Amino acid sequence: MDEVRALQQTVSEVDLIPVRPAYIRLVERLREAGMAISDRRVVRLQRVVAGSAVISGRDHAAVSDLWTLRYIWDVPAQREMLAAHVQVIVTDFSAKNEPENVANIHPLADSEQGPHPEQIALALDNISAQLNEPAVADQLALLAARVESVKNIDSREYLRLRIGEMRVAEMRGGFSTANRSASRSIHEQVTECCLAGTKLLRRNNMQGRWLRPSCVLIRWLSDCDD
Amino acid sequence: MKDLDWRPIATKLRRDVLDPIKLRLVGKDEIIEVLGVSLVAGENTFLYGPPGTAKSALVQELASRLGGRAFDYLLTRFTEPSELFGPFDLRRLREGELVTNTEGMLPEAEFVFLDELLNANSAVLNSLLLALNERIFRRGRERVRLPMLLTIGASNRLPEDDALAALFDRFLLRVHCDNVPTERLSEVLQAGWQRERSGRAHHR
């Protein structure tokens, strides 16, 4: 027990200077993306970043310790968004800094296992509910980049299709009623995407959650068709 | 950093605590690592997920491997502060003293697990917030410093009102704790069976 307390003590002495620019930039990006992170939390999260350093045997924080910020969501739909932002910042700043010793990187900093397809699907559900927001294009671009590192080919294919259909919709001014009648050609494209996606799902027995957004789209399209 | 040699302790924490728990609780590697950082940082973690996903077992494992005392409680909407912090000591009450008997309760635990955290009602909420913010327990003239090292809250829902949001806010890290994917179910069954057996053996 005393040893744990000693480690907690050590955390307060970790040198955070090496990560500060990356940390600030990340917080800035997350706030721009609409996450409300209070200054109080930003200050306290430094302890968590330092904790990752200590547990990895370092007396100074490194950019890789920012993995911890993937776990600060308020609703689960933000998870994939957080992971994407963290990845961008870590890649950006690792290029500028001295390379880190692999042995001293925290195991969760390694995004080898690739992003979780279902989490991306969840993030997309979230975005499709607010397609008219100005930040949507950025968020879609970010997720599109994440999709490319999804390991499972079928899931990746399906997610690509979904992002494609959402981009089309977003460019045409979203799903607002005003645009519905004018978007005949989108109909066809979207139906095609949905059907392809559904087929993939059937073939792989994937979870129902993925099916739902496609069904909603198909239902909406059939409403418009008359 | 100071003369204290903390690196072996960090290595030990991983080798003797985190890694063995990963073997015992299948598919929880991510959560175990987050809890490890959370423990070292002294910040609390919230586990989001359905019941029956080994959340309580995680905390028990951590506590027992680190030789700490654990307090584990399932909150209902009717939970009163005394259920967490301990009842008044009746013998001393007769002598006119208002003292809480905290034996085996939250004020004596290093590891606190509060299941269904968001069931906390306003009576519990105040004492909990104070405990989480300042690691202090206060009742009447009593003021006790809490040995709390790590508090873990769990729920399968998220806060809907401001009071609960304030409580949720005290849990800096949030992890999803879900059922293990079916392709690893066989490992879960094996590990669970092993635990069951060693558990029974202890009781005998």
Image: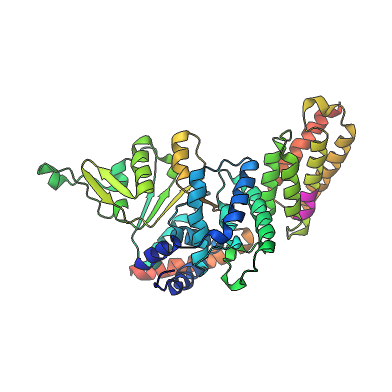
- The answer to whether residue B51 is visible is no
In the image, is B90 to the left or to the right of B184? left
The residue under the point 35% across, 70% down is B202
Viewer-closest of B32 and B188: B32
Q: Position of residue A100 (x, y in %)?
A: 62, 69
Q: Was residue B155 drawn as part of the magenta stretch in this picture?
A: no
The residue under the point 29% across, 55% down is B108
Viewer-closest of A176 and A82: A82
Viewer-closest of B99 and B48: B99
The residue under the point 11% across, 41% down is B96
> Residue A65 lies in what quarter of the image?
bottom right
What is the magenta range? A155-160
Q: Position of residue B158 (x, y in %)?
A: 52, 41
Whether B39 is drawn above or below A176: the answer is below
In the image, is A214 to the left or to the right of B27? right
Q: Position of residue B104 (x, y in %)?
A: 28, 55
Classify the position of the N terminus of chain A by image quarter. Answer: bottom left
- The answer to whether residue A178 is visible is yes
> Residue A134 lies in what quarter of the image?
top right
Residue at the far right: name it: A185
Classify the position of the C terminus of chain A by image quarter. Answer: top right
Viewer-closest of A153 and B8: B8
Whether B149 is drawn above or below A212: the answer is below
In the image, is B163 to the left or to the right of A29? left
In the image, is A48 to the left or to the right of A67? left
Q: Main secondary structure of the magenta part?
A: helix
Whether A74 is drawn above or below A219: the answer is below
Q: Position of residue B167 (x, y in %)?
A: 44, 42
